[in-house]
Amino acid sequence: MTFNKLIQTHTWASIASKFLTTYPEAEKNIKGYELVFEKLKKMDPEKTDMGLGLKSVIGEDENYVDVFGLHKNPNTKEENYPQGIEFIPWRQWLGMEVSKESLAIFTAQDIIVHCLYEMAFVGFSEEDIQASINSIKKNKKERKPVTEEEQDKINAAVEEILKEWRE
């Protein structure tokens, strides 16, 4: 089942209360999430080589649901591992097949809620998300590379701090 199919078989009214129960801190931005949901309902999905997965992560400090993409036909070693997909175009999200494991563990509403939260993590429009991507790229270009000598000084300082900490 694709993410688009899940979106098409639900209404915002059936998602909103689950969203607020799952992410109560998002109440101040609930209209933004609703707008994203309604935009998704009108979009055509785009085929992609990536599937959609979710898994519960239980940590010492926090518990959360990880939303990730997984390449169906990996071309590199890195593509064998779960991928962050918050910057993926929404049409591609819609075209992703939801993993059987995720469908067995999570309800359709849970999947939609967690995906909406992830999709809108950096903005409530694809333009906002693209602006974030552009900003990241610009900052990366403007960052001055560290010389080997500077890196050695940083490493020495870290080693000194760790030595003092151990003592």
Image (cartoon, rainbow, N blue to C red):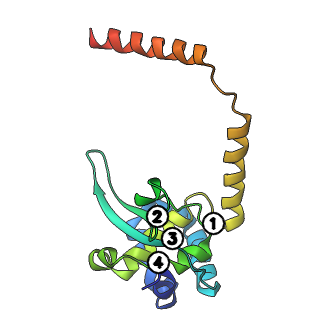
Give the mark nearest the N terminus, 1 or 4.
4
What residue sits right under mark 2 in the picture?
A: 74
Which numbered disc covers residue 116?
3
Judged left or right of residue 69, residue 164 is left
> At x 27% / y 75%, what residue is drawn?
105
Residue density around tag 1, few if under 14, some if 14–19, many if 20 or more, within 10 Å: many
Residue behind mark 4:
16
Instruction: Give the number of the mark in front: 3 or 2.
Output: 2
**For residue 105, above or below residue 42:** above
- In the displayed structure image, the side of residue 45 where residue 15 appears, left or right: left
First in sequence, mark 3 or 4: give its number: 4
Look at the numbered discs 3 and 4 and tell me whether their residues touch, using CB distance below 8 Å.
Answer: no
Amino acid type, residue under disc 4 in the picture: Ala
Distance of label 2 from label 4 (alpha carbons):
36 Å
Q: Which residue is mark 1?
A: 124
Name the residue located 46 percent from the left edge and 83 percent from the top edge. 2
Amino acid type shown at disc 1: Phe
Q: Give the residue drawn at x 51%, y 89%.
A: 8
Q: Earlier in the sequence, mark 2 or mark 1?
A: 2
Given residues 131 and 88, the one toward you in this image is: 88
